[in-house]
Image: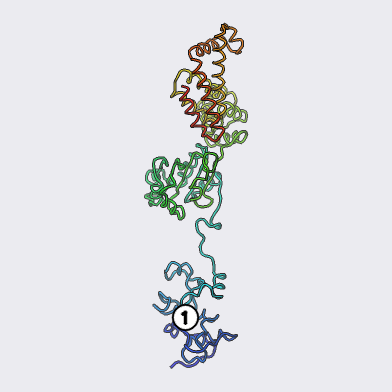
Amino acid sequence: MERPRPCGEPVPAPLAAGRHGRPHPGGDHGRGPGRRQGAESAHRGDRSPRGARHGAGTGRRQGASVARVAPGGARGGGAWPAGEYRDQCELRQGGVGAGRRGCSPAGSRAGAGPRPAGSPRAARSASAAPPGPPSASSPSNACSVDYAGLLREAERRTVPPVALLHGPAPLLLDDAVGVLSAAIFADPASGAFDREVLDGRETTAEAVARSAMTLPFLAARRLVVVRHAEALAAGHHETLLAYLAAPSSSTCLLLLAAESLRADRVRKNDHWLLRAVPAGSAIELVPPRGQALERALQQRARLDGLEVADEAARLLVELVGDDLGLLLGEARKAALAGGPDNRRVGAGEVRAVVGDHRVSDLFDLVRAVERGERGRAQALLDQLLRGGEEPLRLLGFLGGELRTTWTVKEWARRGMPAAEIARRLRRPLPVAERVLARAESLPTADLARRLWRCWQVELAVKTGGQPRAEMAILIADLS
């Protein structure tokens, strides 16, 4: 028979192991200042003069610790020393053993069920409970990063599990693939097994998720690149949504879109990928313009070992356009003009090699349309648009040439000689004669139809139509 112990004397562990923290039936004491003493007495055995409700007060924490000592006892999955608490994460996962940090989860009690949701104790326990681990999209885990920051982290071999890059900057997208590949694959041979490139126009969101969930073979991580991610349909994408909510740490999923995924006049709402990826994982690439483009060209050329002078950068932008990829290619060609070992690009090398691309391409487009060379005209149109040419400027140029042809046709009908037509057009006589021959070969009704099509396309572009598609259809009609 156990002897009575003074209040406050600790219970030996062997004795506590045979008890489950059950309060003594009877009585309703321990609600006042003596509640801790009553709690200790309630756990010492049936001799306690105190009542059954002592474990409901502050003293219950000692009872909870004692209750976990018994193997297979109430709420216990193994032997736990008296006075220690399970880690909150272990209780959440149902595991036993590793984490013991002296903290009891909110609302968990030994040998008793959960407190009612509306009870004052449940409210106090919930307010005092330590927060759980942050989710992938919680603010504590979300860190917004820009393009330069992504590359800097990749150079330190720190790559994100998910990254969405979108914007009309193909060179920057390609550079990101190269830098992340170098960061993940120290041995380039492992990239043959652990790098996969998908096309969003030819695959599905479910296939992307399956590829991202595949374990690496040789390298420590896999790299899954999805080009044209804007083409991934919103339907049947539950698997990819679930993956993006909890991405694998053994895979870097790189989603690339060659256009902005933000809402605009064509896309009424943001693309669903912007809402699906973890917070801070979407990076919008805005192509630089003006002096910013010149500086970007110089910085990017420096990575290739080229030194582009300020005047050469300004001249390249003026002659070639706003496409950073085309500018870099022309800078490389200009460097070769100074010899195979030349690494400096000046204005002289640019003038000798590049030439006036924009003006010559505009006239080549008009000539291709006049000759009916539909394929070449479409290729020139695509090249001009990728180079940063404004669709409305192209449309104005084509419409102006049609109006000139109609005017020359009217002058020829009145009997005006070719020399006078050349003087009025302020063009050389051979050029005026070519325009005159073109005007005489086209019926007036055909010229009127072509001009009417130009006005229709102008109206469509200015009222929210897609410029590239409208211009491509117009070139097909005029050729």
* Residue 389 visible in image: no
Q: Is residue 127 above or below residue 226?
A: below
Q: Residue at x 52, y 12 (%)?
A: 434
Residue 219 in the image, given as x and y percentages of width and height: 40, 49
Residue 401 in the image, given as x and y percentages of width and height: 55, 19
Q: Residues within 10 Å of mark 1 (few under 14, many from 20)?
A: many
Q: Quadrant of residue 140?
A: bottom right
Q: In the rendered view, does 150 fall on the left or right side of 219? A: right
Asked whether 434 or 303 is in front, the reply is 434
Asked whether 367 or 82 is in front, the reply is 367
Q: Is residue 241 above or below residue 357?
A: below
Residue 239 in the image, given as x and y percentages of width and height: 41, 52
Q: Residue at x 59, y 85 (%)?
A: 32
- The residue where tag 1 is placed is 66
Task: State how the image is colored.
Answer: rainbow
Q: Is residue 268 above or below residue 298?
A: below
The local secondary structure at tag 1 comes to helix
Q: Give the residue type at disc 1.
A: Val
Quadrant of the drawing holding the N terminus? bottom left
* Number of marks drawn: 1
Residue 405 in the image, given as x and y percentages of width and height: 54, 16
